[in-house]
Amino acid sequence: MGKLLCNFAVGEKGRIVSVSGEGRVRRRLFDMGVTPGADVTLVKKAPLGDPLEVTIRGYQLTLRKAEAECVEMEAVK
């Protein structure tokens, strides 16, 4: 079983397995390039865990914790 992006530790890398969520949220994530198969590295987390900064497809992206909870990942070494 995978792990949600919001539960990753800073510096951890993974690959997106699936994206869940309601229509608007899911569509927004897809529009930003958060799609299955993409490699993601968690760069920073705010002190309270919201928001998170990730590197995906060669650019920096900031996600809300609620959005990161919709992204199921598999760890990659």
Image: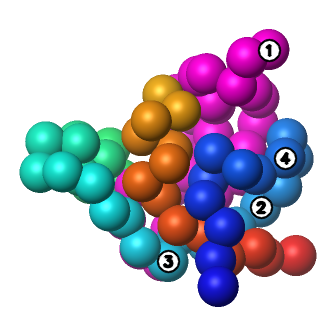
Say few, some or many: other residues with alpha carbon within 10 Å of mark 3 (under 14 / 14 to 19 / 20 or more).
Answer: some
Q: Nearer the viewer, residue 7 or 15?
A: 7
Q: Nearer the viewer, mark 2 or mark 3?
A: 3
Q: Which quadrant of the rendered structure holds the C terminus?
A: bottom right
Q: Is residue 10 left or right of residue 69?
A: right
Q: Is residue 70 left or right of residue 22?
A: right
Say few, some or many: other residues with alpha carbon within 10 Å of mark 1 (under 14 / 14 to 19 / 20 or more).
Answer: few
- Residue at 77 percent across and 61 percent down: it is 13
Residue type at tag 2: Lys
Residue type at tag 4: Ala
**Labelled disc at residue 9:** 4
Asked where in the image residue 35 lies, by quadrant, the reply is bottom left
Marks 4 and 1, how far apart at CA:
13 Å
Q: Is residue 3 above or below residue 48?
A: below
Residue receiving disc 1: 47
Q: Nearer the viewer, mark 3 or mark 1?
A: 1
